Image (cartoon, rainbow, N blue to C red):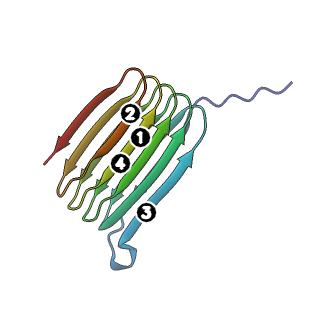
Amino acid sequence: MRLVAVLISALMLVNTDTRAENLALQAMLERKDMTSILAINQHGVANNGTISQAGYANTLSLLQIGIANDAEIEQNGTGNKISVQQLGDENRLQLLQHGTDNQIDITQHGNTSFSIEQIGQGEILSVTQY
């Protein structure tokens, strides 16, 4: 009998290319494993991030530094945590969490926009906008 155990599935995406041919930085990810850690760092001009996680003990971190930031995040699961910082010019963000131990921390500097929907049990939300 073969036993396969996946404890942590981790993904880290770092994009720091700000050259003229890479003005539209995008990260579109969809994860559906049981324990996921996802970290995305985008340093650029026209950032975009679309993330969807479903699973058990999710942790998500998104950092966008640039001019035309955009992020759309959805998490399902049990021990969810999201931390997003968009330190750019035209920030937009839309979050949706379903789950049990939800926690969201958002910091936006710039032209900021914000939308959230948390459905869960231990909901904690902290938002800073300028």
Q: Distance of mark 3 from mark 2, alpha carbons?
A: 25 Å
Q: Is residue 123 left or right of residue 9?
A: left
Q: Name the residue under label 3.
A: 26
Outermost residue to the right: 1
Locate residue 34, reporting x and y percent: 60, 32
Q: Mark 2 points at which residue?
A: 118
Corner quadrant of residue 103: top left
Tell me if mark 3 has few (under 14), some (14-19) or many (20+) residues whose alpha carbon lies within 10 angstroms of its own: some
Q: Do the residues labelled 1 and 2 touch (CB within 8 Å)?
A: yes
Q: Is residue 62 visible?
A: no
Corner quadrant of residue 96: top left
Locate residue 19, reporting x and y percent: 33, 75
Q: Do the residues labelled 3 and 2 touch (CB within 8 Å)?
A: no
Q: Mark 1 points at which residue?
A: 96
Number of dots carrying numbers: 4
Task: Say which residue appears at 24% left-offset and 65% top-offset.
Answer: 67
